[in-house]
Image (tube, rainbow, N blue to C red):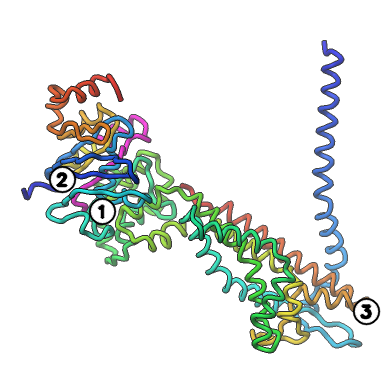
Amino acid sequence: MIGGDVRGRLIKDIFFKGIVCLFAFLSLLPLFLILYYITKNGIMVIDWDFLFNLPRPIGEAGGGVWNAIVGTLMLIVLSSVISIPFGITAGIYLSENKAGKLSNTIRLSVIVLQGTPSIVIGIIAYLWIVAPLQTFSALAGGVALSIMMLPVIVKTTEETLKLIPYHLKEASLALGVPYYKTILKVILPSGLSGILTGILLSVARITGETAPLLFTAFGNQFMNINIFKPIDSLPYRIFYYAMSPYPEWHSFAWGASFILVVLTLALNLIARGISAKWKTRF
Amino acid sequence: MENTVLKIDSFSAYFGDNKILKEVDLTVPRNVVAALMGPSGCGKTTLIRCVNRMHELIPGATVSGKMTLIDEDIYAMQPIVLRRKVGMVFQKPNPFPTMSIYENVIAGYKLNGIRMAKPELDSIVERSLRRSALWDEVKDALHRKGTFLSGGQQQRLCIARALAMNPEILLLDEPTSALDPKSTSQIEELFVELKRNVTMLLVTHNIAQAARVSDLTAFIYLGELVEFGPTEKMFTVPKDKRTEEYLTGKFG
């Protein structure tokens, strides 16, 4: 029944499907290879001593990444504290003022900022914070990372709030609720899950950044919780351990990488969970 | 004159240069349902959105003329003060999705930062839900989200939310156009019940609904108030030829 022409088409069809599946599979491969190598080389390193010890000087065996974990968490908190208020406010502005010169300028700036190389942002933070204070500091690192978080937060806040039906805002205004309370108590809570997701994704994005920290937070082999002093971070510790000539330190680099990857993976999964579970039904 | 709730005096509304309403005069007495009917785009929705000054939220929207609520000039009041005295129910049910049924009813107080003791709030919630004929259906689920209700129930929740503020007048902007026939008839019965102590201004594109529910009817056509009077009279002996043509389905 099937003519030659039709059979030819069917074969092309199957061939095309096969190609699509193959390339889809190949694009997954890098992630799995990364996870495989990091787990294989990193997981044996992880133990209590590694997690909760400070790095030791050259020549001494052992040591860990406790200061880097604390440093990374502090940098996350600092950069979030700086970027979240600005990011959410700008996002609100954009969703409230869809057209207009300022809105278009902000939108363009956000796109440009997103594409700015992280090392350049590091230099700016160096100029702004490190040079005037005359010391590398956690604060400088936090500022650099917050600039990197900003575009993601602005964009996700805007996109989330744009999806909130206009009639909700009307319902609130018609009750005599002032504009600012309408935004703060009706619109923002309705978009909370989307905004939180955006924040978590932006945190996941900056957790692994190394370049902007090189001349801002700098790195520190001791424990430090003073934001005006240099501070260690996981990516910097990986860099430091990996560049050393000692095999034990190389394995430490794998271990620290494992922690970092688990952290970013967890952040991404939590973000997905939040956006699925807390989603507001309209 | 004490019996007049809303008085509209040669009122016009514009979007930019476009005149949407042309010198409308209208007087709504206390405790009636006054229906505004007319074909789509005639300006009836614009008219009630001028009563609580939601019209002016749209960029380029302006008005001229006078509106008074009881004895106060609406356009001399602060919009947020005015809107607490004028309730509004919209086309699409719009309960606040982050709030429970209970919180939705008292949203006008909560969002405006008016503090009250719990028993007082409880009684406002119960009274408002009873008035909107929703109490029996939701009394055991007050702390569930309002968005889990059916469309008709959501709309009655929105009516309860507006009633909770004890408005001088309730604006109803095609409140049943997004609902099924059963919910529609429930809500229409509710309006008839409510008019014993609430004044309502009802926008509808449904002629039959105006006939069923309202005491007074205004026919608006192309931004002009063509005719205003007792519903029964207008539906039996319309004064204007255009009203007659609209009622008999010649246009609109």
To the question of a shared chain for discs 3 and 1, the answer is no
Instruction: Report which quarter residue A82 is drawn in.
Output: bottom right
For label 2, count other residues whose C-alpha is less than 10 Å away and answer few (under 14), some (14-19) or many (20+): some
| Sequence-wise first label, 1 or 2 | 2
Label ID, residue B9: 2
Magenta-highlighted residues: B164-188
Residue A144: % across, % down:
67, 74
Figure label count: 3
| Residue B50 colored in magenta in the image | no
Which residue is at 35% across, 54% downward?
A172
Which residue is at 13% across, 33% downward?
B229
SS for callout 1: loop
Subunit that carries the residue with mark 1: B
Disc 1/disc 2 C-alpha distance (Å): 29 Å
Subunit that carries the residue with mark 2: B
Q: Is residue B149 visible?
A: yes
Q: Nearer the viewer, residue B26 or A141?
A: B26
Label ID, residue A246: 3
Subunit that carries the residue with mark 3: A
Disc 3/disc 1 C-alpha distance (Å): 74 Å
Q: Nearer the viewer, residue A102 or B44?
A: A102
Which residue is at 84% across, 47% downward?
A26
Residue type highlighted by circle 3: Tyr
To the question of a shared chain for discs 3 and 2, the answer is no
Pointer 1 residue: B164
Residue type highlighted by circle 1: Ala
